[in-house]
Image (cartoon, rainbow, N blue to C red):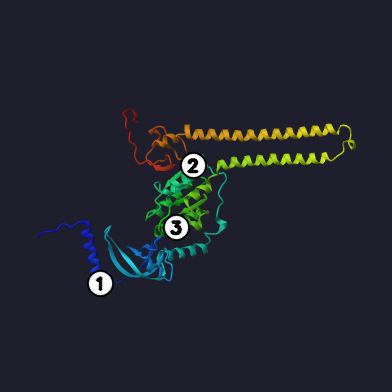
Amino acid sequence: MRYRTLSVTETNQYIKGLFTADPILNALKVEGEISGFKAHSSGHAYFTLKDENSRLNCVMFANQFEALDFTPKEGDFVEIFGRVGVYDKNGTYQLYALKMTPTGVGRLFERFLKLKEALKKEGLFDEGHKVPLPRPIKGVGVITSETGAALRDVISVIRRRNPLLDLVLIPATVQGERAVEEVLRALDQAEGLPGIDLVILTRGGGSYDELSVFNDEALARRIHAMTLPVISAIGHEIDFTIPDFVADLRAPTPSAAGEMVSVDVLSLIREEKALLARLKQGIHEKIRRREEVLSRVRPDQLRFYLDKRIVDLTRIGEDWVQGSSRIMEKRLDRMAYELDLVMEKINGANPLNLLDKGYSRIMTPGGGRITSLKELQVGEDILNELKEGRVLSTVKKIEVTHEKDQY
């Protein structure tokens, strides 16, 4: 038997023909839950229809989408009539939806509502249980993926606003089946870390089913039991998960969480300068009013030394204004000088310069220096300080590379 060699285009077109000729695939009803719904500017709608085990890519063109008598959204459970076809440009098949009918709330969303209502009745969302953020904040534990965009957003905001704030990364998977287990472990670790004033639990945006892994009862109860304040910053502003309600504070985005925990140092300096300006203006205004009152008094009605007294008081007031201005200006100059020194240390002498080149620094969980393998033991916890933050690790194995270092 001789085989004909087909091009990629011919292959996709042949498969497309098979789909087109199939009567079942051309008049098909499918029931499932909407996930990853996106309404394009062209008027077309793109989404995934899923059940507990599988997914099916779907598209609904503008004419059919505009004819719907309801607005589909994430988590809706719907029945779709349409046809399955092949998009031969990339060789993928999808369901072309012609009609869509809502059949109820999606199973994931329904479970979310039931859990939310049960925990609310139990009191886990009560404002009386929420702990205010401490002031000042010196150390922040961040629970998220060490490779995710959420971590980069938090670090970027905090470095810009307050580079003195100490960040410790407690890595955890924030999607998939292992997410809850790893986040629970990270919360336990955060409670035992010294110098941590609060915890940020964060991840970037995603589809509803990706974020729904956080709608877990055990996770909600662990957050509620935390002695450290917890900020929930999961997804985007429109996304809500159970931790958003049980945490001490909700941030609409990871970047917003960074702003909540960091004081803007430059803003403080600007406020000090504005306060000084208002103080000087108030003093000058007070002196001006006193001078106006004195100017209306006839000298012959006063004792002979009143003129001298007025001059003396005016000079004393002016000297006091000038002296106060110098003191405040010196204070601002000193603050600016100290801030420059701190920034110079951070950007120059701080070991983070080496971290920018790919090096890391190993410390004990308490922040003590580790300079020799002799100070380490298998099973011991250590902190690895990298450019973006710190990683809590456990020593699995110790290998000595030089014979003279044997011990």
Q: Residue at x 34, y 39 (%)?
A: 397
In the visual, does 283 lie left or right of 121? right
- List the residue tagged with mark 3: 218
Looking at the rendered structure, the kind of residue marked 2 is Arg
- Dot 1 alpha-carbon crowd within 10 angstroms: few under 14, some 14 to 19, many 20 or more: few
Q: Residue furthest top?
A: 404
Disc 1 is placed on an element classified as: loop
Q: Is residue 183 above or below residue 168?
A: below
> Which of the two residues, 122 or 82, is positioned nearer the viewer here?
82
Cα–Cα span, label 3 and label 1: 48 Å
> Which of the two residues, 382 or 178, is positioned nearer the viewer here?
178
User: Which of the numbered marks, if any, corresponds to residue 293?
Assistant: none
- List the residue tagged with mark 2: 159
User: Residue 60's x, y, as percent?
Assistant: 36, 65
User: Residue 324's x, y, as percent?
Assistant: 69, 35
User: Residue 237's x, y, as percent?
Assistant: 48, 56
